[in-house]
Amino acid sequence: MTTALLRRLLPLPFVVLAAALLVFLLPRLAGIDTVRAVLRSRVAEAEPDPAVAARLTAELGLDRSWIEQFLRWLGRALTGDLGLSFATRTAVAPQLGAALEVSAVLAVLALLIAAVVGIPSGVWAARRPRGALDRVVTGLSVLGVAVPEFILAPVLVLVLAIAVPLLPATGWGTLPQAVLPVLTLAAFPTALAAQLTRAETLDALGLPHIPVARAKGLTERRVLWKHAARLALTGVTALSGLFFAGLIGGAVVVEVVFGIPGVGRLLYDAVLGQDLPMIQAGLLAIVVIAVLASAAAELAQLTMDPVALSRALR
Amino acid sequence: MPPARRRSRTTLTGTCLAAVLALATACGGATGAATGPVRPDGELRVALQFSPRSGYAMDTDDAFVLHQFGATETLVNSGSDGRPQPGLATSWAQVDPTTWRFDLRPGVTFQDGTALDPAAVVNALTWVSGVAAPPRAVKGIGLRAVADGPAAVRVTTTRPDPILPLRLSSVNTAILAPSAYRADAPPTVLGTGTGPMRLTAADGMQQAVLERNDAYWGTKGSLKTVTATFVPDPAARALALRAGDVDIAQGLPESSLLEFTEGGGYTNSAVAAPRTVTLMMNQAAEPFADVRVRQAVEKALDRTALAEQALAGAALPAAELFGPAVGWGSQDPPPAPDVEGAKALLAQAGHGPDDPVTVRLQTYPNRPELPTLATAVQGMLRDVGIDAQIQIGEYATQEPDLLDGRYDLFLLSRNYLTDVPDAGSTLVSDYSCAGSYNINRYCSPAFDALLAPLGTTADPATRQEVFRRASAMLTADVVGVPLVHSQENGVARNVSGYTVDPLAKDLVTPGLAVLGE
Amino acid sequence: MRRGGLVLAGVAVAVLLLAALYPVDAITTHLGERFQGPSVSHPLGTDGLGRDVLARLAAGTRLSVWFTLLAVALCAVVGTLAGLLSGYAGGAAAAVVQRLVDILVAVPTVIVGLVVVAVREPGLGSLLIAVLLTGWAPFARLAHQLTLRERSREYVEGAVAIGAGPVRIAVRHVVPNALRPLVAHACLRFANVLLSIAGLSFLGLGAQPPTPEWGAMLAEGRQYLFVAPQLVLIPAVAVVGTSLLVTLLGRQLEGRWSSQ
């Protein structure tokens, strides 16, 4: 068990370090004139002024060698200091933290819906393959994968905020405001969860131990839902590993369309405003989350699934 | 599964979408007008276009947001007529060419309870002129402030400055309580202004909450609280207003303004902004060094069609650099296009089917109207035989090339008042031979001579006459083609006293009120 | 099942043919003809600049479909090669590649797109880079698994025993058997990439005006939502329809080939 753990965990710090270097080098790849970007983010139509530019260069430490800048940046990042945003001149870390919190709430709620709605519908659909229920679930799940957020979001707003004014169309902070964005965000993972569950359930129903169980007098219903409960456990962790980072960082469209102060919108605004420290910190955070989420999901699956565990230990 | 059913689902989706849209369109505007008496202690919700990007730092554009909220005030007020009005200073006078004296309004207290005194004003002005990148209004003038007795300050500049009072109407020079200013950080703006509203909560780029300042020195309004939400996406702002999330939405797409009718209880308001979209032409290189080619471009462009059709009336056609937002601006319509005349001029300049004019037309996407205009301009130029290839990229990456004259055509949206209701600094930086932002690469000794009196003349009428003549000269020399003047708009529902400020300085005024029970 | 796949493919080909043959210019503006309804000269009406909507849709179809095909093909080639190599090489190198793949699969394409745009500039080139940076990973994962599976098969082990070199084994045995699952996977990825590209264009970071791309058309049309809803509806149907079509095709292929 420990060796398996170690084998999984050991490369992670190196991956993160490599990602950090890449993230740090981004502006250099970009050839962005940092000083000019700073000036324009503070005052929209700033005319260039060499004296001011020189002062800013010194203030931001841009006149030193890049290795020196990288080590300084990395050292500070390790202590949780992600630098000052060019645009706001306030610390990046608290802003990113607040945005991550918002995005995490969105992501968790969306995953919850995916698990609560997607997995049972997958099991249901698998009970009678090609039956009416199966066709509905399969059809909806195919649609759920095919309809992108930027179409689903306006449709939901038109229906539930304007045609029938039940919910607010924008904003964040209250429960009603969370409904539409969470629904939009949940569509894809829910559809995928339903599809995967259906396929797995069909596989499981074909396994040799199921007829045995039936022969032992267990009702089909019990067999099915026992299987479903196991799937729900492993499925949710697998889903989280697959989607968590994606939902946290990838909800850009939802956050822009609904005006939600999450990481996606923070980074979108940072890109439009060429706020490099913010972009760098945000990307680093998302890579770290992706690393941790995939590692955690894998470990969780290892502990829950004895077959995979024995394979990993071999 | 039979394939036919799958295809029918695709069409079904389309039908559903169509039905939803039809339903929404039918129900949307019909919420009914609930006009009525002014609600005392009303609560107003506003959706704003621009979020404070620099943590409400007073030396950045965020100062506009604070002033719009009624949280901060300046020594001098001004309108677009270019004349200074009393603000926190009741009167002022030029003591000598480089010194002005401002008498402070008595009885004003900051929202933290301290009194407005000369020391506080000196402190605020010294801070804003001393930051690393001073705001445009006070940049490079060597502004220094000292107390002058118990109720006045003296402000000096290194060179004679005829428009110093106007500079102190810039929102960046608003006066905050001394307690606001900290070492190594921008001043804190929570409860440190003098205005009729007090900023009580500022949640980054999401929202801001203001409460009425009951100790305000002037007329107090009826609004008890104002909640401003920052929604950068224009379509989302329109939906927020339609869904009733907010009472006022600023900066809506012009096409959606048509939908917010008075019958639905909405009040539309739109004003010309001191902002012009100009087609810059690089005079430092062929083909636009030749004035005939520039004239051909001017004749090719149907500016009325650009404003009214391409931009759906979101902007006004421009005849000159300065438009109806300012007293000295042109009110006339631009000349009608002349395709044949343009072709003839191109032929005279030696361009024809054998030697067509092939150029790049660059612009940037931050202002959504620019790519649209570029597309329409491209079409109009094609009709006279000029082939323009559109290139859209970030402004910042293009700026060095623009300033060095490495471009052909550039579409630029520019505010010609740069924070102060006076066009002097824009004319000097953009069009004089030594200008730091002379993208057109225009250099005319006659034009520079025309601008010379601006350095000394304080009289608004004389200055405005210079602006008028300068603008006419730029038009005669075809220094770029001013295409359209932008408009600022906003829509309110169940609100009275709402107007859009062309200078983007005022929003929450004493007259603004929520209607209904 | 077989007929279903054929019909879907037929629909796809017909749409592409129509898109390729529709002759009207998609860029030229006719400011006098804004927001027209459907007519003989403009079967789907005109947009806010008087451009023919069908022409823009057709041009958008060409652009979206070819661009996505190119992106998916590049991802498939790079990813498959990486997966094959790591499947063969094994050891530390393979472990590193697989770790990288695990992470890239979890990093959202939209974020990579944002960063590439920040580093370069908005446009289709940046989009292609963003899609490639993450898009090769799923192919690499699949190819790696397939390679391991094929290698452990008895006939391959037999071929090794009679002295066949690794290249020969890869070309003769592994690639042909891995091809079908990879193609089916490519179909499923196609929809994903299509939506990513349209999403980034919707945010204004992809195709720039006047380029007719579906996501960009949606974003443009959104401001006329209540004036001319068809300007949103038409590209929306195109996006959803295409992604449905390709997804269903991929499922058909996957189902058929896995049942064999």
Image: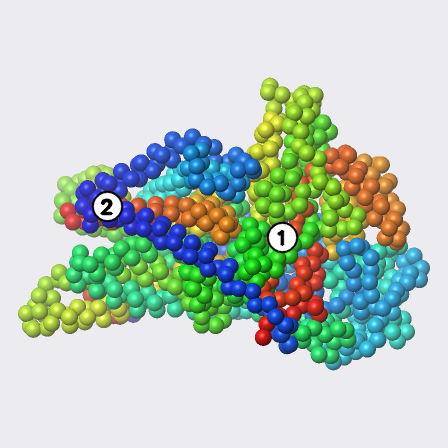
Q: Nearer the viewer, residue B484 or A181?
A: B484
Which residue sits at x=32%, y=62%?
Answer: A190
Foreground mark, 2 or 1?
A: 2
Q: Quadrant of the C terminus of chain B?
A: bottom right
Q: Position of residue B467 (x, y in %)?
A: 81, 45
Element at badge 1?
helix
Q: Nearer the viewer, residue B1 or A45?
A: B1
Q: Of the residues shown, which amino acid type is indicated by label 1? A: Ala
* Residue type beneath disc 2: Ala
For image coordinates 20% across by 50% down, the residue present is B1
| Relative side of C253 to B482, left or right | left
A92 left or right, relative to B509: left
Q: CA distance from mark 2 to mark 1?
A: 55 Å
Residue, x 65% and y 66% (percent of image)?
B496
The spot of residue C74 in percent (x, y) is 37, 42
Look at mark 1 in the image and give the residue it sits on.
A37
Along the line of sight, the residue nearer the viewer: A165 or C218: A165
Q: Quadrant of residue B133?
A: bottom right
Question: What secondary structure is found at the residue carrying circle 2?
Answer: helix
Q: Is residue A100 visible?
A: no
